[in-house]
Amino acid sequence: MDELQIIHWLAGFIVLAEALNKAERTCPLAAGLSAHERLLAWLKAVAWFFLALGAAGAVVAPVLLALGVPSGATHLLRLERPTLAETAVLFGFAVLIVRTRVKEG
């Protein structure tokens, strides 16, 4: 793995951990929420779900490639090296997550 792949995988791992943590604490079906609060909770849950899904792909793709799974074997996962754009977006999210954690203490 080259440096770009390592950064992509590490950023994916950080985003996946945070997304699963946040998704677990999001309760869109909690009692007593107004319609506006419920909508916001659902939007938050959906956003964290898709961030977790994308980050999981970033984490598992190198493993599947290392195991010799051919790129055309999956329909929903592109088993190729990450692009600079993909890595930059994922790394940006990871930096924001780490910044928030450091800020919170």
Image: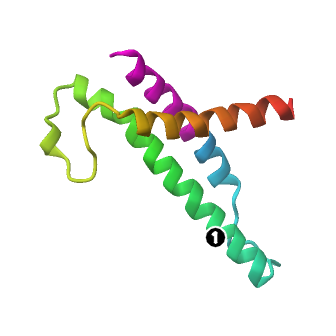
- Residue at 60% over, 40% down: 93
Residue at image coords 31%, 27%? 63
Q: Amino acid at mark 1?
A: Trp
Quarter containing the N terminus: top left
Q: Nearer the viewer, residue 32 or 13?
A: 13
Most distant residue in the bottom direction: 35
Q: Quadrant of residue 73?
A: top left
Farthest-out residue, front: 85
Instruction: Tell me the residue at 44%/47% (across/down).
Output: 54
What residue sits right under mark 1 in the picture? 42
Crowd around label 1: few <14 · some 14–19 · many ≥20 (10 Å) = some
Residue 20 position, x and y percent, is 59, 46
Residue nearer the viewer, 77 or 4? 4
Image coordinates of residue 104 in percent, x first then y, are: 85, 35
Instruction: Judge left or right: residue 11 versus residue 101.
Output: left
Above or below for 81 versus 53: above
Residue in the image at 65% along x and 45% along y: 21
The answer to whether 75 is drawn above or below residue 89 in the figure is: below
Q: Disc 1 on helix, strand or loop?
A: helix
Q: Which residue range is magenta in the image? A: 1-17
Name the image quarter holding the C terminus.
Answer: top right
**Residue lying furthest top:** 2
* SS majority, magenta: helix
Q: Position of residue 42 (x, y in %)?
A: 64, 70
Instruction: Please give left or right for residue 63 compared with residue 4 in the image.
Output: left
Q: Position of residue 90 (x, y in %)?
A: 51, 38
**Colouring chosen for the image of the structure:** rainbow
In reply to whether residue 9 is colored magenta, the answer given is yes
Residue 63 vs 39, above or below: the answer is above
Magenta region includes residue 47: no
